Amino acid sequence: MKTCTMPSANGKGAVLIEKILDEELGDKCGLYARVTIPAGSALGYHEHHGNGESYFILSGTGVYDDNGAKRTVGPGDRTWTPDGSGHALDNSAGTEDLVFMALIVNS
């Protein structure tokens, strides 16, 4: 398992990405990882082109932006962003880490 901390694109703070599978995915998936957004941070709005992405929330709460429609997400919630759409996940008002599984599926 590969772990990296990186600045949040278009967001604030940093996110921790623990890749569960990497080269094993071949050309079918772009990412399968456990992602942690610390309290006070946000994964900024970004669009998907040539792939879609799903989040499955494990712990914590945050505000999910689905192409401008915002909703609160928490443990057990799942999201789907299809090819050509965008999303963001904000934990800037949270008091605990927001942890989720991320899966990027290539089109």
Image: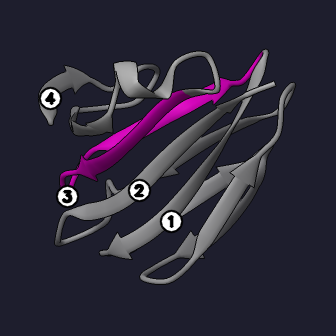
Look at the numbered disc 3 and give the secondary structure of its residue: loop
Question: Which marked residue is nearer to the observer: mark 4 or mark 2?
Answer: 4
Residue at the spot of label 2: 101
Q: Are marks 4 and 3 in contact (CB under 8 Å)?
A: no
Q: CA distance from mark 4 to mark 2?
A: 14 Å
Q: What are the residue bounds of the magenta stretch? A: 30-49
For image coordinates 46% across by 79% down, the residue present is 74
Label 2 is placed on what type of residue? Met
Q: Amino acid at mark 1?
A: Phe
Q: Earlier in the sequence, mark 1 or mark 3?
A: 3
Viewer-proximal residue among 86 and 70 = 86
Q: Sequence order check: which comes first, mark 4 or mark 2?
A: 4
User: Is residue 35 inside the magenta stretch?
Assistant: yes
Q: Is residue 65 at all visible to an observer of this figure?
A: yes
Q: In the displayed structure, does residue 17 sit left or right of residue 62?
A: left
Mark 4 residue crowding within 10 angstroms, few (<14) / some (14–19) / many (20+): few
Q: Which mark is residue 39?
A: 3
Q: Residues within 10 Å of mark 3 (few under 14, many from 20)?
A: some
Main SS, magenta residues:
strand
Numbered disc in front, either 1 or 3: 1
Q: For the point 33% across and 26% down, which residue is it?
A: 8
Q: Position of residue 75 (x, y in %)?
A: 42, 82
Query: Which quadrant holds the N terminus?
Result: top left
Identify the image quadrant of the C terminus: top right
How far is disc 1 from disc 3 in space, using C-alphas? 18 Å
Work out how far the residue at label 3 is from the one at label 2, CA to CA, in angstroms: 17 Å
Residue carrying label 4: 2
Sequence order check: which comes first, mark 4 or mark 3?
A: 4
Query: Where 9 falls versus 80 (above or below)?
Result: above
Give SS at disc 4.
strand
